[in-house]
Image (cartoon, rainbow, N blue to C red):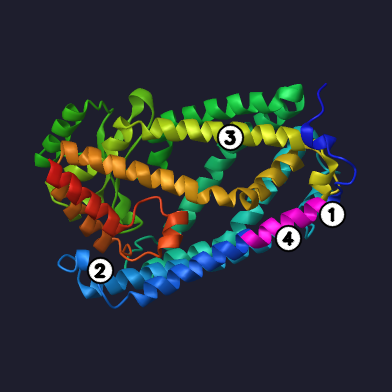
Amino acid sequence: MKTPIFAQLPPTFVTQDFTQIFLACFALTLGIRLWLKRRHIRFIASHREQVPVEFAERITLDSHRRAADYTIDRNKAAVLGIAIDAGLLLALTLGGGLAALHAFWAPRLDGLFYGLAMIFSLMLISGLVDLPLSLYRQFVIEARHGFNRMTLGLFFADLLKQSLLGALIGAPVILAVLWLMGAMGDLWWLYVWLFWSAFNLLLMFVYPTWIAPLFNKFVPLEEGDMKARVEALLARCGFRSSGLFVMDGSKRSSHGNAYFTGFGDNKRIVFFDTLLTRLDPPEVEAVLAHELGHFRRRHVAKRLVMMFAGSLTFLWLLGQLIDAPWFYAGLGVDAQNTALALILFFLVMPVFTFPLTPLMSTLSRRHEFEADAYAAEHAAADDLIRALVKLYRDNAATLTPDPLHSLFYDSHPPAAQRIAHLQQQGSRS
């Protein structure tokens, strides 16, 4: 049996060393995240009173101020969320929370069901801690800025559905993962990865027809100019779908969007009803051309490959840590088992992987530029520009994000860069 590499560390690497490393990375990550949010808020506030030159003829000052206020409110809530998450992480690890859960469940359950109880207990605690902030975001911030259409009853109905669905799907998956970790020897991480990858592909396939309808109604796109344009675009792009649908997104929010979902022959194109009421048919066609650009440029496949590669790397790393006593003790847990290893690893991993955030965001923004270029080839660039401006205005998206915050977090390019890129594409066509 091969000894995992981290179990071979010299005795001089004791529990306190790992604790200090964790706390140093925790403090650095927390400090940077809070600094970036505060910097973002200040930057937007300082540009609140002037519409960027590129949008002066398209966006009114009142709309620009509304977007600034909405973004500031959301980021203030995000600051609170970061602080709460940080406090919960410390409470669960060095504060003894996980140790207390272990002490409660270990005498009552063993084996796989102990692990299931530990993981579900952690999910319940995290959900309860996040609940007040979720309610504040939905019924204070979203309502204050005119976006919320969700009732309190619908909010808790969604929460109940999500919880039941999570339990029905999550319990067998967790049990399978824990069983593989205990039964497959040194290469358990490879078997878990194969299972996890297959499960995610299956979930992508069944989501459109089995899961999404539990939360929203989907009706076929009506006959007319819009449908004719969409079908002509699909024919030009060589895209085959299992249907064109309109989703009742307006029952929860006035935000608008469009997307395609599914896998293989089960791909669906979905429009928010709010999007169709705001955009003209040529603009909707251009937005859909952008979404199709992600498919034709294989962005979905590339992201899947990256996700699977990342999960394989993380599971291998966990395989090297699982037998290292200092990993558990350094995070405040004296016991040592597969469930605790899984929980601790995925609790603390974001602390150590935070430096990768801007790399992933940069890749995502590159994909957005590529999808815009594809849209400009198969629809009118000016139509996509008009659609984006309307969406920026109606969704109160800020036109003046802090550049450094955007570098870390924004999956889409800043508005000014994106419009300029599309104008270049349009001038070439």
The numbered mark at residue 140 is none
Q: Are marks 2 and 1 in contact (CB under 8 Å)?
A: no
Q: Give the alpha-carbon distance from disc 2 to disc 3, as whole Å.
A: 41 Å
Q: Which residue is mark 2?
A: 52
Q: Give the alpha-carbon distance from disc 1 to disc 4, as whole Å.
A: 18 Å
Q: Which residue is mark 3?
A: 311
Q: Which quadrant holds residue 153?
A: bottom left
Q: Residues within 10 Å of mark 2 (few under 14, many from 20)?
A: some
Indicate the position of residue 408 as horizontal and vertical percent values: 47, 55
Q: Which residues are magenta?
A: 17-28
Q: Amino acid at mark 3?
A: Ser
**Which of the two marks, 1 or 3, is nearer to us in this view?**
1
Indicate the position of residue 183 as horizontal and vertical percent values: 75, 23
Q: Which residue is mark 4?
A: 91
Q: Identify the residue at image location x=69%, y=49%.
A: 121
Q: Give the alpha-carbon distance from disc 4 to disc 3, as whole Å.
A: 26 Å
The local secondary structure at tag 3 comes to helix
Q: Which residue is mark 1?
A: 16
The local secondary structure at tag 2 comes to loop
Indicate the position of residue 414 as horizontal and vertical percent values: 33, 57
Q: Quadrant of the C terminus?
A: top left
The local secondary structure at tag 4 comes to helix
Residue 134 appears in view: yes
Q: Would you say 379 lies left or right of 170 here?
A: left
As displayed, is residue 182 above or below residue 281? above
Residue 218 appears in view: no
Q: Mark 4 or mark 1, which is nearer the start of the sequence?
A: 1
Q: Amino acid at mark 1?
A: Gln
Q: Mark 2 or mark 4, which is nearer the start of the sequence?
A: 2
The local secondary structure at tag 1 comes to helix
